[in-house]
Amino acid sequence: MGSIFSLETLEATFRMATPLILAALGGCFSERAGVTNIALEGIMAFGALAAVIGSYVTGNAWLGFLIAAMIGGLLAYIHAMLSVDMKADQVISGTALNMLAAGGTIYVCRVLFGSMESDTVKRLPIWGAYEPTVYIAFFMVLLSWLILYKTPFGLRLRTVGEHPAAADTVGVDVYKMRYVAVIISGILAGLAGAHMSIGVSDAFSKGMIAGRGFIALAAMIAGGWHPIGACIAALLFGFFQKLSLTLNGVAFLGVAIPSQFMNVLPYIITIVVLAVAGTNSVGPRANGIPYEKGER
Protein backbone atom coordinates (compact mmCIF):
# COMPACT_ATOMS: atom_id res chain seq x y z
CA MET A 1 0.00 0.00 0.00
CA GLY A 2 2.90 2.30 0.74
CA SER A 3 4.08 2.09 -2.87
CA ILE A 4 0.65 3.30 -4.03
CA PHE A 5 0.74 6.50 -1.97
CA SER A 6 4.35 7.50 -2.51
CA LEU A 7 6.34 10.31 -4.09
CA GLU A 8 6.91 8.11 -7.13
CA THR A 9 3.15 7.68 -7.54
CA LEU A 10 2.64 11.43 -7.20
CA GLU A 11 5.25 12.20 -9.83
CA ALA A 12 3.84 9.57 -12.20
CA THR A 13 0.32 10.90 -11.64
CA PHE A 14 1.42 14.39 -12.67
CA ARG A 15 3.10 13.03 -15.80
CA MET A 16 0.14 10.88 -16.80
CA ALA A 17 -2.35 13.64 -16.08
CA THR A 18 -0.46 16.25 -18.12
CA PRO A 19 -1.85 15.38 -21.59
CA LEU A 20 -5.32 14.99 -20.07
CA ILE A 21 -5.08 18.42 -18.42
CA LEU A 22 -3.95 20.16 -21.61
CA ALA A 23 -6.59 18.50 -23.79
CA ALA A 24 -9.32 19.03 -21.18
CA LEU A 25 -8.46 22.73 -21.03
CA GLY A 26 -8.78 22.82 -24.79
CA GLY A 27 -12.21 21.25 -24.47
CA CYS A 28 -13.19 23.90 -21.92
CA PHE A 29 -12.37 26.72 -24.34
CA SER A 30 -14.12 25.14 -27.30
CA GLU A 31 -17.27 24.01 -25.52
CA ARG A 32 -17.57 27.16 -23.41
CA ALA A 33 -17.84 28.94 -26.76
CA GLY A 34 -20.52 26.52 -27.94
CA VAL A 35 -18.55 24.16 -30.21
CA THR A 36 -18.34 20.50 -29.32
CA ASN A 37 -14.84 19.21 -30.04
CA ILE A 38 -14.56 15.45 -29.84
CA ALA A 39 -11.64 15.68 -32.25
CA LEU A 40 -9.22 16.15 -29.34
CA GLU A 41 -8.13 12.52 -29.69
CA GLY A 42 -7.20 12.93 -33.34
CA ILE A 43 -5.57 16.31 -32.81
CA MET A 44 -3.44 14.82 -30.04
CA ALA A 45 -2.31 12.07 -32.41
CA PHE A 46 -1.38 14.56 -35.12
CA GLY A 47 0.33 16.73 -32.52
CA ALA A 48 2.38 13.78 -31.28
CA LEU A 49 3.53 12.96 -34.82
CA ALA A 50 4.15 16.61 -35.72
CA ALA A 51 6.34 17.05 -32.64
CA VAL A 52 8.43 14.05 -33.64
CA ILE A 53 8.77 15.19 -37.25
CA GLY A 54 9.64 18.72 -36.15
CA SER A 55 12.22 17.46 -33.69
CA TYR A 56 13.64 15.05 -36.29
CA VAL A 57 13.92 17.63 -39.07
CA THR A 58 15.17 20.59 -37.02
CA GLY A 59 17.14 18.68 -34.41
CA ASN A 60 15.45 20.83 -31.76
CA ALA A 61 12.73 19.41 -29.50
CA TRP A 62 11.36 22.86 -28.66
CA LEU A 63 10.75 23.58 -32.33
CA GLY A 64 8.99 20.23 -32.56
CA PHE A 65 6.87 21.30 -29.59
CA LEU A 66 5.88 24.53 -31.35
CA ILE A 67 5.15 22.71 -34.61
CA ALA A 68 2.81 20.39 -32.72
CA ALA A 69 0.92 23.43 -31.43
CA MET A 70 0.69 24.86 -34.95
CA ILE A 71 -0.60 21.62 -36.45
CA GLY A 72 -3.12 21.29 -33.63
CA GLY A 73 -4.33 24.83 -34.30
CA LEU A 74 -4.58 24.15 -38.03
CA LEU A 75 -6.68 21.01 -37.56
CA ALA A 76 -8.90 22.85 -35.09
CA TYR A 77 -9.31 25.61 -37.68
CA ILE A 78 -10.65 23.00 -40.11
CA HIS A 79 -13.07 21.77 -37.44
CA ALA A 80 -14.17 25.36 -36.79
CA MET A 81 -14.66 26.03 -40.49
CA LEU A 82 -16.88 22.96 -40.83
CA SER A 83 -18.77 23.58 -37.58
CA VAL A 84 -19.11 27.36 -37.48
CA ASP A 85 -19.25 28.50 -41.11
CA MET A 86 -20.66 25.42 -42.83
CA LYS A 87 -22.96 24.47 -39.92
CA ALA A 88 -21.87 20.82 -40.18
CA ASP A 89 -22.77 18.44 -37.39
CA GLN A 90 -20.00 19.04 -34.85
CA VAL A 91 -19.85 15.45 -33.67
CA ILE A 92 -19.53 14.14 -37.22
CA SER A 93 -16.86 16.73 -38.01
CA GLY A 94 -14.87 15.73 -34.94
CA THR A 95 -15.31 12.04 -35.69
CA ALA A 96 -14.02 12.59 -39.23
CA LEU A 97 -10.86 14.21 -37.86
CA ASN A 98 -10.39 11.32 -35.44
CA MET A 99 -10.72 8.82 -38.29
CA LEU A 100 -8.30 10.84 -40.40
CA ALA A 101 -5.80 10.76 -37.53
CA ALA A 102 -6.20 7.01 -37.01
CA GLY A 103 -5.01 6.23 -40.52
CA GLY A 104 -3.27 9.43 -41.55
CA THR A 105 -0.67 9.50 -38.81
CA ILE A 106 0.31 5.88 -39.50
CA TYR A 107 0.54 6.54 -43.23
CA VAL A 108 2.75 9.61 -42.76
CA CYS A 109 4.91 7.74 -40.24
CA ARG A 110 5.42 4.86 -42.68
CA VAL A 111 6.29 7.24 -45.52
CA LEU A 112 8.85 9.14 -43.43
CA PHE A 113 10.27 6.40 -41.21
CA GLY A 114 9.37 3.17 -43.03
CA SER A 115 7.25 1.73 -40.23
CA MET A 116 4.36 2.46 -37.86
CA GLU A 117 6.89 3.83 -35.37
CA SER A 118 9.26 6.74 -35.78
CA ASP A 119 12.97 6.74 -35.17
CA THR A 120 14.31 8.01 -31.87
CA VAL A 121 14.33 11.81 -31.85
CA LYS A 122 15.41 14.58 -29.53
CA ARG A 123 13.05 14.91 -26.58
CA LEU A 124 12.33 17.80 -24.27
CA PRO A 125 14.77 18.22 -21.35
CA ILE A 126 13.95 17.41 -17.75
CA TRP A 127 13.43 20.40 -15.47
CA GLY A 128 13.99 19.21 -11.92
CA ALA A 129 11.76 16.17 -11.46
CA TYR A 130 9.51 16.70 -14.46
CA GLU A 131 9.36 17.41 -18.16
CA PRO A 132 8.61 21.08 -18.98
CA THR A 133 5.22 20.06 -20.34
CA VAL A 134 4.12 19.18 -16.79
CA TYR A 135 4.87 22.69 -15.56
CA ILE A 136 3.27 24.18 -18.67
CA ALA A 137 0.09 22.18 -18.09
CA PHE A 138 -0.41 23.43 -14.54
CA PHE A 139 0.48 26.97 -15.57
CA MET A 140 -2.14 26.72 -18.31
CA VAL A 141 -4.77 25.73 -15.73
CA LEU A 142 -4.23 29.03 -13.91
CA LEU A 143 -3.97 31.02 -17.13
CA SER A 144 -7.13 29.44 -18.56
CA TRP A 145 -9.06 30.23 -15.39
CA LEU A 146 -7.88 33.84 -15.50
CA ILE A 147 -8.76 34.21 -19.18
CA LEU A 148 -12.18 32.58 -18.94
CA TYR A 149 -13.36 34.15 -15.69
CA LYS A 150 -11.36 37.33 -15.13
CA THR A 151 -11.17 39.00 -18.55
CA PRO A 152 -13.67 40.64 -20.91
CA PHE A 153 -12.59 38.15 -23.59
CA GLY A 154 -13.53 35.24 -21.33
CA LEU A 155 -16.91 36.80 -20.54
CA ARG A 156 -17.66 37.23 -24.23
CA LEU A 157 -16.54 33.68 -24.98
CA ARG A 158 -18.77 32.21 -22.26
CA THR A 159 -21.70 34.35 -23.38
CA VAL A 160 -21.30 33.05 -26.93
CA GLY A 161 -21.60 29.52 -25.54
CA GLU A 162 -24.60 30.30 -23.36
CA HIS A 163 -26.64 32.71 -25.48
CA PRO A 164 -25.03 33.57 -28.83
CA ALA A 165 -28.00 35.67 -29.95
CA ALA A 166 -27.63 37.92 -26.90
CA ALA A 167 -23.89 38.23 -27.55
CA ASP A 168 -24.60 39.08 -31.18
CA THR A 169 -27.06 41.76 -30.10
CA VAL A 170 -24.42 43.64 -28.10
CA GLY A 171 -21.90 43.49 -30.93
CA VAL A 172 -19.89 40.36 -30.13
CA ASP A 173 -18.77 38.52 -33.28
CA VAL A 174 -20.06 35.03 -32.48
CA TYR A 175 -18.28 33.38 -35.39
CA LYS A 176 -14.92 34.97 -34.56
CA MET A 177 -15.16 34.05 -30.89
CA ARG A 178 -15.98 30.44 -31.73
CA TYR A 179 -13.12 30.25 -34.22
CA VAL A 180 -10.65 31.58 -31.67
CA ALA A 181 -11.89 29.24 -28.94
CA VAL A 182 -11.70 26.15 -31.17
CA ILE A 183 -8.22 27.06 -32.41
CA ILE A 184 -7.05 27.49 -28.80
CA SER A 185 -8.44 24.03 -28.05
CA GLY A 186 -6.48 22.61 -30.98
CA ILE A 187 -3.25 24.26 -29.87
CA LEU A 188 -3.61 22.80 -26.37
CA ALA A 189 -4.47 19.34 -27.74
CA GLY A 190 -1.44 19.51 -30.04
CA LEU A 191 0.77 20.27 -27.03
CA ALA A 192 -0.83 17.35 -25.20
CA GLY A 193 0.20 15.07 -28.06
CA ALA A 194 3.73 16.51 -28.02
CA HIS A 195 3.99 15.59 -24.34
CA MET A 196 3.31 11.98 -25.29
CA SER A 197 5.89 11.77 -28.08
CA ILE A 198 8.80 14.06 -27.13
CA GLY A 199 8.03 14.74 -23.46
CA VAL A 200 7.78 11.38 -21.73
CA SER A 201 9.01 9.52 -24.81
CA ASP A 202 11.35 10.04 -27.75
CA ALA A 203 9.35 8.55 -30.61
CA PHE A 204 5.90 8.22 -32.15
CA SER A 205 4.14 4.86 -32.25
CA LYS A 206 0.76 3.56 -33.36
CA GLY A 207 -1.92 3.89 -30.70
CA MET A 208 0.19 5.94 -28.31
CA ILE A 209 -2.69 8.33 -27.55
CA ALA A 210 -4.84 5.33 -26.52
CA GLY A 211 -8.10 7.17 -25.91
CA ARG A 212 -6.63 9.97 -23.82
CA GLY A 213 -8.48 12.56 -25.88
CA PHE A 214 -11.78 10.98 -24.87
CA ILE A 215 -10.67 10.69 -21.25
CA ALA A 216 -9.83 14.41 -21.39
CA LEU A 217 -13.38 15.11 -22.55
CA ALA A 218 -14.64 13.06 -19.61
CA ALA A 219 -12.40 15.09 -17.27
CA MET A 220 -13.80 18.30 -18.73
CA ILE A 221 -17.39 17.17 -18.16
CA ALA A 222 -16.65 15.80 -14.69
CA GLY A 223 -14.96 19.11 -13.88
CA GLY A 224 -18.02 21.10 -14.89
CA TRP A 225 -16.41 22.69 -17.96
CA HIS A 226 -14.17 24.61 -15.54
CA PRO A 227 -10.34 24.65 -15.86
CA ILE A 228 -9.69 23.85 -12.20
CA GLY A 229 -12.39 21.19 -12.03
CA ALA A 230 -11.09 19.62 -15.24
CA CYS A 231 -7.56 19.60 -13.79
CA ILE A 232 -8.70 17.83 -10.64
CA ALA A 233 -10.60 15.23 -12.67
CA ALA A 234 -7.57 14.73 -14.95
CA LEU A 235 -5.36 14.16 -11.89
CA LEU A 236 -7.83 11.54 -10.69
CA PHE A 237 -7.66 9.72 -14.01
CA GLY A 238 -3.87 10.05 -14.02
CA PHE A 239 -3.73 8.48 -10.57
CA PHE A 240 -5.77 5.50 -11.71
CA GLN A 241 -3.57 5.11 -14.77
CA LYS A 242 -0.56 4.89 -12.48
CA LEU A 243 -2.47 2.59 -10.14
CA SER A 244 -3.23 0.21 -12.99
CA LEU A 245 0.52 -0.12 -13.62
CA THR A 246 1.42 -0.44 -9.94
CA LEU A 247 -1.12 -3.18 -9.25
CA ASN A 248 -0.49 -5.09 -12.47
CA GLY A 249 0.28 -8.66 -11.45
CA VAL A 250 -0.39 -8.04 -7.75
CA ALA A 251 -2.37 -10.73 -5.92
CA PHE A 252 -5.48 -9.78 -3.92
CA LEU A 253 -6.59 -12.30 -1.27
CA GLY A 254 -4.32 -14.82 -2.89
CA VAL A 255 -5.77 -14.27 -6.37
CA ALA A 256 -3.71 -12.49 -9.01
CA ILE A 257 -5.52 -9.53 -10.55
CA PRO A 258 -5.68 -10.13 -14.33
CA SER A 259 -3.46 -7.71 -16.24
CA GLN A 260 -6.26 -7.15 -18.75
CA PHE A 261 -8.48 -5.78 -15.98
CA MET A 262 -5.77 -3.43 -14.75
CA ASN A 263 -5.19 -2.17 -18.29
CA VAL A 264 -8.82 -1.15 -18.67
CA LEU A 265 -9.14 0.24 -15.12
CA PRO A 266 -8.67 3.91 -16.13
CA TYR A 267 -11.39 3.53 -18.76
CA ILE A 268 -13.74 1.89 -16.27
CA ILE A 269 -13.15 4.81 -13.91
CA THR A 270 -13.89 7.19 -16.80
CA ILE A 271 -17.27 5.54 -17.39
CA VAL A 272 -18.13 5.53 -13.69
CA VAL A 273 -17.17 9.19 -13.22
CA LEU A 274 -19.15 10.21 -16.29
CA ALA A 275 -22.17 8.26 -15.08
CA VAL A 276 -22.03 9.99 -11.69
CA ALA A 277 -20.98 13.48 -12.77
CA GLY A 278 -23.10 13.47 -15.90
CA THR A 279 -26.31 13.45 -13.88
CA ASN A 280 -25.48 16.81 -12.29
CA SER A 281 -23.21 18.50 -14.83
CA VAL A 282 -24.84 21.10 -17.02
CA GLY A 283 -22.77 22.33 -19.92
CA PRO A 284 -23.07 25.58 -21.88
CA ARG A 285 -26.62 25.87 -23.19
CA ALA A 286 -25.61 26.58 -26.80
CA ASN A 287 -22.91 23.91 -26.92
CA GLY A 288 -23.10 21.90 -30.12
CA ILE A 289 -25.75 24.18 -31.67
CA PRO A 290 -24.71 26.01 -34.88
CA TYR A 291 -25.51 29.71 -34.84
CA GLU A 292 -27.03 31.55 -37.78
CA LYS A 293 -26.30 35.26 -37.65
CA GLY A 294 -29.48 37.21 -37.03
CA GLU A 295 -31.22 34.45 -35.03
CA ARG A 296 -33.04 35.54 -31.91
Image (cartoon, rainbow, N blue to C red):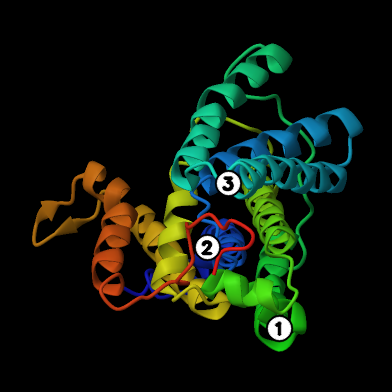
Sequence-wise, the earlier of marks 2 and 3 is 2
Q: State the image coordinates of residue 151 (x, y, percent, origin top left).
A: 75, 84
Residue at left 37%, top 63%? 240
Residue at left 68%, top 48%? 190
Residue 208 visible? The answer is no
Residue marked by disc 1: 146
Q: In this view, does 111 lie to the left or right of 70?
A: left
Residue marked by disc 3: 83
Q: Which residue lies furthest to the bottom in this view?
A: 150
What is the secondary structure assignment of the residue under circle 1? helix
Residue at left 24%, top 66%? 275
Sequence-wise, the earlier of marks 1 and 3 is 3
Q: State the image coordinates of residue 116 (x, y, percent, origin top left).
A: 57, 19
Up/down of 41 relative to 25, above or below: above
Q: Which mark is residue 17?
A: 2
> Label 1, label 3: how many angstroms apart (C-alpha)?
27 Å
